[in-house]
Image (cartoon, rainbow, N blue to C red):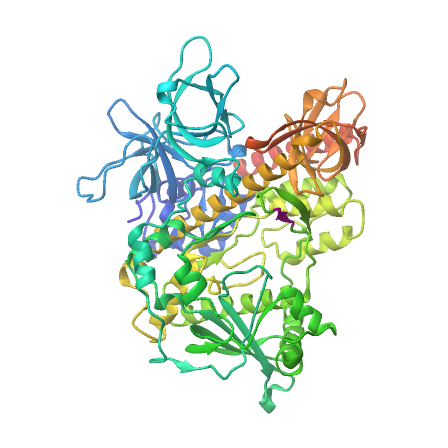
Amino acid sequence: MAKRIPGSRGGDASRSFRPSREDILRFIKENPDQAGKRELARAFGLKGPDRVWLKDLLGELQDEGLLEKRAKRFTRPGALPHVVVLDIFSRDADGLLLARPTEWPEENGAAPTVSIRPRRADKARVPGVGERVLAKVFPAEEAGGPAYTGRVMKVFEKRREAVLGVFRTLRDGTFRIEPVERRQAELIVDPDYAANAKNGDLVEVEQVSSGRYGLPKAKVLTVLGSLESEKAVSMIAIHAHDIPHIFPPEVLEEAEAARPATLQGREDFRSLPLLTIDPADAKDHDDAVHAEPDTDEKNLGGHIVTVAIADVAAYITVGSALDREALKRGNSVYFPDRVVPMLPERISNDLCSLREGEDRPALAVRMTFSAEGRKVRHSFHRVMMRSVAKLAYTQAQAAIDGTTDDKTAPLLETVLRPLWDAYTALRRGRNERAPLELDLPERKILLKEDGTVDRVIVPDRLDAHKLIEEFMIQANVAAAETLEAKRQPLIYRIHDAPSLAKQESLREFLQTIGLSLAHGAQMKPSSFNGILSRVSGSDQEALVNEVVLRTQSQAVYAPENIGHFGLNLRRYAHFTSPIRRYADLIVHRALIGALGLGKEGISKGEEERLEEISALISATERRAMAAERETVDRLIAAHLATRVEEAFHGRISGVTKAGLFVQLPQYGADGFIPVSSLGDDYYMFDEAARALFGERSGKGYQLADSVEVKLVEVTPLAGSMRFEMLSEPKPLPGSKQSFHKARRGKSQSRRTQSRGRARRR
């Protein structure tokens, strides 16, 4: 229940009553789970014109930085989400547990503290200090204590207070732990605490003492394996981020006991020439495609596209050991040297892999498109299919470009060309939709047999990639639309528009390079595309692409829909990769249940836990991204460890008060240049321009600048590199004096406007 604010009225009497700004802000603070525009209007009894007034007031509060909009709810800037993952770090004087958010942006300052309130009725295990929990949080009612109170929804597996390191035997026979984290100290290990570890072993240790003098001592808890072995680098990230990578025996037993699905209860699609198009090194194939011209005279030039997705729900039943483990993992994690799968190989690489020439169960969607690429209709089917071919992206593209082989030649006219014809139409629809078009090349690390880096490449972006991508996007949209039409709860893939604060920051930056961005809360991807097109081919192209990317919000999973800003879609749900994403499995179950396609539909319990599940899998996705990024950094650092004192061409990828981050485009890894090493000038940080400039010279370095740097230090295990700047600073667009005058004038103008609003109130 929403808390009634003194002075608020309900019913007809509220028509002449409008709450104050303070009333609105207080209600949002005290009711984070009921802070949408509709809930606010209902709480204060606002109707008709008063709702328009409320919309304007909320926009004004956003403009002033007093509110942010997350999904469909308003919140105070820097506030925690209503459901969040917390780490418990201590107890207060009354013995209550204290926690902080597991992830918290540095730019938001110190992370808020949450006081965990126990409930006697809770049947779940009571968490302790050092554990990680999923909790609902509420702003605290009493001042002077923790900012939030929390109610535990789920306790994760107990985390040991252990750190990772590499066991080293020194020449004098003593033992040391070489840190794998950048801020971690070196440790000493007594022989009694070595646990038979050998030189070069990756180990988990806990600190056992720390005297006033000398290095702290540690005890080896677990020997994880030798760094000399293949795939050792990714093992560091796996353990550092607590990524489950060993399937429990009961999970493997369930997987081995699974039997192939039969045709019973399914439509027979085996005569339809569906095929898979994947990377050449793909081991599992969870999507197959087919297209043909629409023969309906009412849809001249139209196409019928079929997307078939592996029917994982047929094998992973709700509440089973396989299901619990899949939710715990949330998604597969992809490292350059290995994959940590969400499901055992028996499921992902065998029963659910759409292998060429073998019968496989699938959930298929048939979509009819007009000649202009607009979807006319769609329908879902639970089927048995048989792939006619397994093709690599390059193989399919070569066939379309005129170079066929023994496999693609028979398929060219009957299967491949209809696919490309349909994609041509869908591309027209995509262009009309105008999603965000960032030009950010993706790099791929190729390894040698020993697990070290061979080279780093930027694979060509082929039409074959774009075809599969667009077909999958349309299938995901169809899934969301169908479930909404059936009023079936689901998990959406949502991507919020950039916050007004980020828009304003981008606007200030663009002014420094002579570009403008229109004001207004209703930004569209086309607004950003217009900026990107204006700098296309210029020296500022890389810079603007980078800044626009950093302006965007992070996509997450949620049971409430706000649309997908980047794709410019009103409804979007992940449906096409249930082998590697738990969100897709939930959507499959929801479709099966809503459409009456079998007994493996979503359960009532799952529907009630969608908010919890969404928070969990959003967290595991961020965990995977961090682990993958850190592994790439370590691999590249090890690859370049023998090239200290060499010069490299780089690009500034980050600017902070402390210095510059420089990315080596050839390798896709970053290193750091401390501001103290930049020269004799005193360098100042210009946040709006994303630059450091010399106080005396006015010259400096800006985000995305091309520079020459010298590699001066490498720490491979921590994945860190330190550079020395070789390039001279350059004049920055717009002088620092004029820029800061503009900033002061803008701030003064805002203060004047605020005083005016205060007088009107």
Whether residue 47 is visible here, answered yes or no, is: no
What residue do we see at 51% from left, 59% from top? 563
Q: Choose between 639 and 211: the one closer to the eye.
A: 639
Q: Is residue 609 above or below residue 550?
A: below
Residue 250, position in %: x, y? 28, 54
Magenta stretch, overall SS: strand
Task: Tell me how many marks there are.
Answer: 0
Q: Is residue 215 left or right of residue 160?
A: right
Q: Is residue 642 above or below residue 486?
A: above
The segment highlighted magenta reads 443-448
What residue do we see at 32% from left, 41% from top? 157
Q: Is residue 649 left or right of residue 98?
A: right
What residue do we see at 77% from left, 17% from top? 680
Quadrant for residue 374, please give it: bottom right
Which residue appears farthest toward the bottom when viewing the image? 297
Q: Is residue 569 left or right of residue 154?
A: right
Q: Choose between 627 and 693: the one closer to the eye.
A: 627
Which residue appears farthest toward the left when viewing the image? 121
Whether residue 596 is visible here, answered yes or no, is: yes
Q: Choose between 571 and 523: the one closer to the eye.
A: 571
Q: Please check the rendered image and state whether residue 270 is part of the magenta-colored stretch, yes or no.
A: no
Residue 455, position in %: x, y? 68, 46
Q: Please check the rendered image and state whether residue 446 is part of the magenta-colored stretch, yes or no.
A: yes
Q: Choose between 701 and 390: the one closer to the eye.
A: 390
Quadrant for residue 560, please give it: bottom left
Residue 604, position in %: x, y? 27, 62
Residue 629, position in %: x, y? 56, 42
